[in-house]
Every structure is written in C-alpha cells, then in structure tokens.
Image: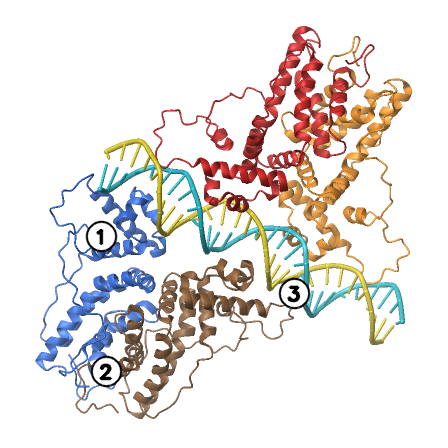
Chain colours: A brown, B blue, C red, D orange, E yellow, F cyan
DNA sequence: CATTAATCGAGACGGTACGTCCGGTCTTATT
DNA sequence: AATAAGACCGGACGTACCGTCTCGATTAATG
C-alpha cells in the first residue's frame, strides 16, 4: 500500500487548449486541432447574433423548464433561428444544453486560494461551488446531463472535462500541497480522497434525500478529513 | 454542536405495509389503503399474464437499451398487451421502469450481518451491492431514473423509498451499533456519515470518472472511517 | 388489317368493386379484397369527421393553390388533425389529392345517353366533361397529378382507373354501338379512336397553347370523325 | 364558317432571335434585348466550364432520377459549383432542367422534307420525334415540365416556344402546302388539325395508358387524316 | 500598373416540409 | 370490470431543399 497515488481514474491531463471562446464545446472536443489561426476564413462568416440567441434561448428553457424542454424546435423558434443552424453547430440538444449551462457559469470562476491549511483550502473551494450548484434548479439540470451522458460516451467525456475535472483539479492541487506539507500522509490515495470530498455533495444534490447547505458542506468536509471514527484532538476551527 | 443526530434527511419511517406482491409499486404508494380484502371482486379479474409480460418486456428494454427505449408503444407491442392496460397500472413509463428494475433485483436481498466491527459491517453490506450496481448497465439505468426523479417529486420519493432508503437503513443500524459500542463518537452525525459512505460510490457510478471495484470500495470505506488525514496507528486488517 | 380491335392499351377490365365510399382510394387499390363484410370491427372506429375535414382541407388547397400547396403539415393544421392520422390513410400527398379531387367530382357523373348517332353520343359525353375540366384550375391539377404519376406506377394506375378509364369506357361503348350500326367500319381501331377523341382536348388542357371551349370541342370531334381531309358530303348538323 | 383559319392559339410569331448559344434560355426570354454586341465586357468573363458542368449535372439527374432530383444543392455539388452561380443564370430549377433537356436534344433536329403528300410529310416529321420522345424517360420529364408550367406562365411560354411550337410550325407548313395543293379543304382549321395530330401522341405519352410505337403513330395519323368514320376508297399505301 | 467590376467558390442562414416516432387519451367489441 | 385492438391529437425528431446572404479570391478591361 505504500505505492504512489496512481489511480484508475481518467487522467486529468486534458490540454488547456486555448480556443476561440465562440466555438461550441462539442465541436471543439471533436476537432481539437482547431483551425490553426492561418485558416483562410472562407464562406459567409458565422453569425454571432444567432449563436448568442441560441444559447440564450437554451439557457432559459434549461433553467426554467428542464432539459426535456430544450427541444430543437422550441429553441429555434425562440431564438428566431432555423433548426438547421442549430444542428450545424450542435449535434444533440444535450450538447447544446451543456454549452448553455457552461456559458451560464462561465463568469463564476472563483479564484483558487492557498489558505495554508487543507481544510481552509477545501472549504474556500467547495463552499461557493456547492452554493451555486444547489441554487436554482441546477441539481436537476446536472442530473439530466448525467443521465444523457450514460448513453453517449463522447458526451460523458465532454461533460466531465468541462464541469467535473476543473474542480477536481483544484482540489487535487490542494491535497498535493497538503501532502507536501505533511498535513496528510504522503501515500494518500488522492483520487479516492477527491471522491470522498465531492461524492457526498453530489449524492445529496442528485438524490435529494438531504439539503446541501453550508452546514452540510462543512460537516462533510470535516468528517472526510477526520474520518467517521473521529480523531483524538480533532477540533475544527 | 453536541446535539443528537437529528437530520434534515427524509425520515426513514415508511410503513412496512404488507401488500400483494403483484400490485405495482407506484400505485401502491398512491393508494395505500389497498382494497381491503373483502372487496366483492366484480368484473373480469386482472390478468397476471399481462402484468408479467409487461414487466418482462420493460426489463429487457431497460437493461438492453436504456430507459429511453422503454416506450409505452414498444412495451405494449412486445408484451402483446394494449397500451391502455399499461396506463391503467402505471402512470408513467418511469414508474414502470422502476417496477421492472425492482422486480429484477428482488431476489438479491442479502442478509445483513453483524460482524462485530463497523468496518466489517460496512464492507459486508456495501461490497455486494457495489458489485451488483456496477455490473451490467445498472449505473446507466440508475442515472436515468434519478434524472426522471428531478421533475417528479412523487417519483423521487418512491425511488428513494425503494432503492436508497433500505440500504441507508442497514448502514444506519450498523453505525448506531458502533456508536453504542463506543467505536465511533456518540454524537456522530449519522446522516452525514451515510453520505460519506455511499456518496463516493454513487459519484463514480454516475459520473464514470473511475471504476467501482472491490478495491475502491475498500479504500473508500477505510478512508471514510479514518479520514483523509489518516489516524496515527490506523492500520486495519 | 382485318383483325379485331385488340389493343396494346391497358385493359379496361377493372372490377367495379363495390366498396364503402369512405375508404381511401389508394388503400382500396392496394387492398382489393376489402374487409369482407364479416370483419369483426375491432378497436376504435375511424373518425368520419377527421376524414371529411382532411379531404375538405386538401380540396381547398388543391383548387386554390395547386398540388404543391397540399402539404401534409398544412392539411393537418387546417383540418385540425394530426399528421399521423393523414399518413395512416394516405401514403403520399398525391394520393390524398387524388381522393380530394375525386370526391370533388363525385356528384358530377352525367348520365350517358344513347342519342342514336355517334357524333351526338360523343358530344353529349365530352362537352360536359370538357367544360368541367377546363373550368377553374383543374387543368393545372390534372397536370400535376400526371407528373406525380410518372414516378409512381401504382399511383399512375390508380389515377387512370378513376379519372381516365371511366370516360374512355363510355366513349368506347358509343364507338362499339356505332360499329354495330355500321356507322363506322367494323374493323375500326377503337383504342386509337379514343386517343383521337380525347388526345386533342388533353393536349390543349395541359399545354395551354389553345383554349378548350365548346367550339373547339365540336370542331375537334367533327374533324376526328371526318378526318383532316374531310368527306365529300360531310355536313355536320 | 368560311373564315380563314385564324386561331385562338398563341401566335407562332416568336422572333427567331439569333443569340449566343451559351446564354440560358430563360434569361434570354426575360432579357430579349441581349447585350447588343458592343458591350465592353468588363469584369471577369463567365466560366464556360461552370456552365457546361451545371448543364451536364442537371441533365444526368433529370434523365436518371427525374425533375424532382434536380435540386440546386445537388446540381451545385455535382458540378463543383456554388449555388449562387446557378442562381445567377437560372432563376429556377425548372428553367435549368429546360435548358438541360434542350441541350440534350439540340443535335437531334431532323431536316424537314417535302415528300409531296401530306401523309408522307407528317409521317416523316412525326415518327422520328415520337421515337425520341418515347425513348428513355423523356415522357416523364416532359410531364414534369408541363406540371411546372402550370404555376408559372413565363415558364409555360418558354417551354412551348422551345419544345412545342417548332414542331407545330413544321406540321403547320405541311398542312398549308396540302391546302394549297387541294389535298385538304382550303378552309381547314389548321390549329385544330395540329391538335388532332399531336394530341393522341402526347396523350399516350403522358398518361401511359398505351404505348407509343411506330404502328400507333401511323394508325393515329391515318385516322386523323381519314377520320374515324373512314373514307370510301381510303386505302393509303 | 493600379483600379474597378463582374464572376466564382464556399458556405452560413431563415424557412418550410418531409416522414417517423412517442405520449396520452379515446372508443369500440370481447372476455 | 378488465382487456386487446387500434384510431386519434399533439409535439418533437433529424433531414433535405429553397432562395438569400456574406465573404475572400479570380480575372480581365479600364484608367
């Protein structure tokens, strides 16, 4: 058990891949070698207006009436756009919903702080996210995206790459700093620890058997750090 | 914070409610006062054959082609049954899928053992379940049921009552025994602990970012018991 | 050349086939052995209202805006009917248009008279039909149906059976009576004669290079009877 | 009734209009005052290659798969040409099909002969045309062009000018010669006679109720000349 | 030689209709 | 009373064309 924390989980080695912010995510994923800047730009350029309108219409439907309300017909009608235009850029309504949700959350990218303690790092990282995710009907939306991912591996990968992996990466870094500091054992199974941190929150979010509030977040993090059995002098700040 | 482990979660106080095994679950939930046995039983009796055929057809579609393949038309055709008959007993295809899955898993009800240690209890409880749930496409089916639950509170309740709460109850009992034994602190927040135990497994099952195998189950349980920080002499057998 | 007037044309031997007036023609053609009266009539009976509304909507579109305006979507919307209902009974919009036109003309079935002379028979037969067919936009509709028939042999057969063959049969009978009377040679090629009678009218109707009025009908019939070379004492009444 | 054969039909007075063979017909019709030769011809000259490719692609689609297969998108793709280029020269796909068919038949312009007898003239004129027109799927194509003409008067005029009127003109000349010769009455209604000659062939061609072979052509011409009633000593060679 | 203007390719766009599928509801005759 | 059969409305699916539009790239004749 003294091995290093190599893990069965998917490698977090996704390239940051600087791409034009306009490009739809799914296409981006399929065509990673995105037009390498020297593309001669042929044909009529794509319409920014149409793209924004599509995303806006999809977002509104997604948040107000759920993924099942995001129909190509309805989005097209509300965005004042032809269905063919949507299909040109998004292969499925799920991928469209993914982009809509992503653009909705794009601004909310909290700066990751190094607070000096693992607990501080995790709380400062997870509490804002848990607040966001448990507000509005985001839980439902996430559940529906996850369901859609079960039947479409490419979509699943894309979903994880954009919504799951960035947060794991932040927490992973915090855990690694803690291991270097000696705050946690050097041979800690970091991927398992990440599941121990995020799992409980996702569990409540998706199953709805309990609320996800600040108190729960704190208790879950503390218990994940100290264990159910607790520690002798385990007195959280 | 020394309060007892009263929790925000839904109470597990569902009545055991002995009901004829034939009655569909959702109807059972909606009509708890089941026909009181002295009903004079007028008209044509309901067809066992039809019910079995419906559940069988739904199960096959559910496991082989996912929830979205469980359409009323297809089930009716495969079961040699009229659509009206299905609608008479199941309000939605999701509730039908729920019953189909339940009947599929009905046999697999492992006896809960008291091994004397919390870790032993949890492993003996969770490992078989994790094996079942991560086999075949059950993960996908569960994800789709959870997604369906987001838009239908009654269905959500029913799903939790039949698939989630029984397992929580078993683990809850193990934790209470451990608290009585002094193996864990008396003021342990048991509902949080339950989320710490089940959350990581559901997380991997639904997100698919890592495999759910025996090793992961053991590591996750150990880390949940001892904490990410670990314990001084924490070296379980 | 003394042979009898056997002809390459399609045999006019279509069975009269008494069928319920409600049944769509195309289905009738495909299923000639129509429900043999002892059919137990299972399931919800078909809606007369829906059928009438569909035919009415199709007729209106057909006559006011042409065959290309008879789209399944538009008919469905105007008839207050689901597209699936239309498709259940008519495989293509052309077959629907055929039925619509047929129902439109159903009343206008002039009694065929035996006037004693071939010329009288033909004029009394053809003039009313020419008037009908050259009124309104029927010419355009017929042209479009004929065009549709080019790519669909079954449709072509059906079109001929219902719109062309009945009129040919009437004229054929008149010619046969004339042959028996000795008014025309006994070895007259009757199918060719029929083409000589109807061809010129269809020609103008479809190509639009000349009008189809009573005068033309009379002149064309006379010239067909007497020949371009004319007859010695050819003095029409 | 002794009036001369003034007729309701459209006058055959279309100007011969010598135009560059390259110019599309429909444009020619709409812009009769074609660039008067002294045009300075500025800008990039039009591409012969593109025009040939467009016509070739349209011809192939037209003859192999019918008018409905001649879609602008498909022609553009097959010709390696942009849709805008097609639209620059042809207003509709029907006009394109017209040109394609015309270019297909361009070579086949039989020299009109004066055989000395009306019957000889007509047979030598009509038989080759009937052979051409009843070969391959030309009948279907003609039917579809006629159908398209019903909704577009300009197109109808153009179609008649290029495909119908030239042949009528030849036959008209033969009839006039026959009238001058005294072979037919001087007051013969020539336009009606033309319909009597061409009508039966078009009738069979479009309706498909009988074949158009040499025998039929001869019988129809003979019957048109001599009349259904026949002539006393009417025994043609 | 630079300008100007007609053209061509590529292809995005709004719109309309296609033919199919499914969800729910209903109306029969049968059991 | 429950069932099999199946017709019905509504709505969404994904595709195919239509006719229009905006680009950048070509290609002469003109200035």
Check the residue under mark 2 and report the chain it is in.
A
Q: Quadrant of residue D110?
A: top right
Q: Quadrant of residue A191?
A: bottom left
Q: At x 82% / y 63%, what residue is drawn?
A: D43
Give whichever of discs 2 and 3 has the lower sequence position.
3
- Residue D212 in percent (x, y) is at 68, 26
How many residues crowd around disc 1 within 10 Å: few (fewer than 14), some, or many (20 or more)? some
Position above or below: F15 against C71: below
Res. B24 mark:
1
Q: Which residue is mark 2?
A: A223
Left or right: B97 in relation to C226: left
Check the residue under mark 1 and report the chain it is in.
B
Q: Quadrant of the C terminus of chain A?
A: bottom left
Residue A172 in view: no
How many residues crowd around disc 2 within 10 Å: few (fewer than 14), some, or many (20 or more)? many
Q: Nearer the viewer, residue C83 or D155?
A: C83
Q: Can marks 2 and 3 be said to lie on one chain?
A: yes
Secondary structure at numbered mark 3:
loop
Res. A82 mark:
none
Secondary structure at numbered mark 2:
helix
**Are the residues at dot 1 and dot 3 in contact (C-beta closer than 8 Å)?**
no
């Amino acid at each position: 058990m003294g091995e290093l924390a190599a893990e069965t989980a998917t490698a977090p080695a996704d390239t940051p891949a600087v791409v034009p912010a306009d490009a739809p995510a799914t296409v981006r994923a399929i065509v990673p070698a995105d037009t390498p800047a020297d593309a001669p730009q042929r044909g009529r350029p794509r319409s920014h207006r149409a793209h924004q309108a599509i995303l806006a219409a999809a977002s509104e439907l997604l948040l107000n009436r759920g993924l099942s309300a995001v129909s190509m017909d309805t989005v097209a009608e509300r965005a004042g756009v032809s269905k063919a235009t949507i299909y040109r850029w998004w292969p499925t309504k799920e991928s469209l919903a993914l982009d809509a949700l992503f653009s909705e959350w794009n601004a909310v990218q909290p700066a990751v702080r190094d607070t000096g303690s693992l607990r501080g790092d995790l709380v400062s990282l997870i509490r804002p996210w848990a607040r966001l995710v448990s507000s509005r009907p985001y839980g439902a939306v996430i559940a529906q995206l996850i369901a859609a991912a079960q039947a479409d591996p490419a979509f699943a990968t894309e979903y994880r790459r954009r919504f799951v992996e960035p947060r794991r990466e932040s927490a992973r870094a915090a855990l690694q700093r803690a291991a270097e500091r000696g705050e946690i054992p050097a041979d800690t199974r970091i991927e398992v620890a990440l599941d121990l941190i995020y799992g409980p929150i996702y569990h409540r979010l998706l199953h709805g058997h309990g609320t996800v509030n600040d108190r729960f977040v704190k208790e879950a993090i503390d218990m994940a750090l100290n264990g159910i059995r607790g520690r002798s002098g385990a007195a959280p700040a």
